[in-house]
Image (spheres, rainbow, N blue to C red):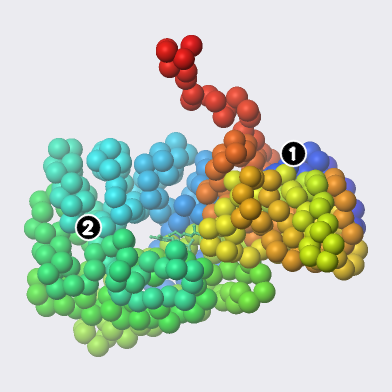
Amino acid sequence: MENKINNSNYMFSGLDTVMLAREYGTPLYVVSEDIIKEKCKEIRESFLLKYENVKAAYASKAFLNLAMCKIIEREGLYLDVVSGGELFTAIKADFPIEKIFFHGNNKSEDELQLAISKDIGRIVVDNLYELELINSISEKYNKKTNVLFRVTPGVESETHKYIITGQKDSKFGIPIVEDIIFKAIKAGIEYENINLLGFHFHVGSQIFDNKSYIIAAEKIMNLIKEAKDRFGFITRELNTGGGYGIYYAKGDDPKPLSYFTDAIMEKVFEKCKEFNLEIPTIIIEPGRWIIGDAGITLYTIGAIKEIPGIRTYVSIDGGMPDNPRPALYDSKYEAVVANKVNEPADNTVTIAGKCCETGDILIWDLNVPKIQPGDFLAVLSTGAYNYSMASNYNKALRPAVVLLNEGNAEVIVERETYEDLIAKNSIPWHLR
Ligand SMILES: Cc1ncc(COP(=O)(O)O)c(C=O)c1O
Ligand SMILES: N[C@@H](CCCC[NH3+])C(=O)O
């Protein structure tokens, strides 16, 4: 696409967003491969090349499609999936199966069968029921499946309560409780078709403080020692999850990756020395931190409703279906009027989605220049958990995704059509 620079237009990753909106329509997810690569470079420089025997995976739930699998593969990262659908997507993109980790608190027999039959890299086991299932499926396929145990370290991170995961009272993972965890480890060692390699923890998402990682690492290292003392079990791998926070709006305080990874490594080294343990392979698996800043969403502004003395609602052609995060987590976003970036932002408005829901407000009290219908709004930092959590509520069409790479733009996911909305519908005989 030709990229004519217009100084009053918002540029993202070297491209004019107004031109993108005009060419591809709105709402439009725009994702920058260049930014993803910068993030991966930081992972390499401050973690993979800094320490021996470490690995990094991308948590694909944040944003996954065939193109993203290819980018992640080229960047040399591993991939974390949490469902048969994510696994299928990775398989279809020919992502190296041995570099995939399969998570989830209730993996179905079909999902496990798919993973095991294809020789998946690791299954991160959430409970004993699942372990038994994996053992029997592996036996059927005459395989020995590599597993880690997800444990809940019993720490609470400071983030939205819906996205903390490391607390004791959590649906995820095996609690570090005498009767449960050691029974699981014993079974993991004894089952014929299981190759227990170690442990996994994930304390939550959109976290700015490394405290909960340090506490979790300490608790897991104590567990690792105990497992060695009781069963002679040598932990070969420790996956420390993801969750590193990014900047969305004022008040967010993102840190470089090393702020988290150095703290985790330091704790692991300290405890290994104290307990005279072999240092396991340490794995990280950020999602949002890799893709969050790499995405924006473009909308067209429509109806503007001014309630004198109260507020002005500015409606856009998307909302809750393409970005459920404000409604779900009260998430804050920043945005700019893409065709008026140089005009003074001296009006305060509220950005409303077009769903039939009072709660479908993307941004409260945003300062914008004087706007009119037909202007374009760019909502920033929408790369993570927007496209992947999008719905068809109100029969909204899921937007297209355009990938920007070194000044070029290309559609990697097409916009849905009305026909797509009814493609799987049928009318029963008695209603015809
Ligand atoms: C097991 C696991 N790993 C990694 C992640 C990635 O999280 P984030 O996108 O916050 O980095 C998540 C989601 O919170 C998760 O549940
Ligand atoms: N969906 C959440 C993050 C969940 C992380 C996965 N365990 C969000 O949008 O912030």
Is residue 353 in view?
A: yes
**Spatial distance from mark 1 to mark 2, Cα to Cα?**
45 Å
Crowdedness near tag 2: few (<14), some (14–19) or many (≥20) residues, C-alpha within 10 Å: many
> What SS does tag 2 mark?
loop
Residue 401 in picture, x, y percent from top left: 64, 43
User: Mark number for residue 166?
Assistant: none
Q: Quadrant of ligand 1?
A: bottom left
Quarter of the N terminus within the rendering? top right
At label 1, the amino acid type is Tyr
Between 96 and 430, which is closer to the camera in this rendering? 430
Between 399 and 140, which is closer to the camera in this rendering? 399
Q: From the image, state whether disc 1 or disc 2 is nearer to you.
A: 2
Res 38 quadrant in image: bottom right
Image height of 15 relative to 218, above or below: above
Which residue occupies 32% across, 86% down? 270
Which residue occupies 10% across, 51% down? 192
Residue 112 in picture, x, y percent from top left: 27, 43
Res 235 quadrant in image: bottom left
Earlier in the chain: of badge 1 and badge 2, it is 1
User: Mark number for residue 127?
Assistant: 2
- Give the residue number, with chain letter if any, for mark 1: 24
Between 93 and 181, which is closer to the camera in this rendering? 181
Which residue occupies 57% across, 41% down? 393
Which residue occupies 30% across, 41% down? 111
Residue 218 in picture, x, y percent from top left: 31, 81
Q: Are marks 1 and 2 in contact (CB under 8 Å)?
A: no
Q: Is residue 36 left or right of residue 95?
A: right
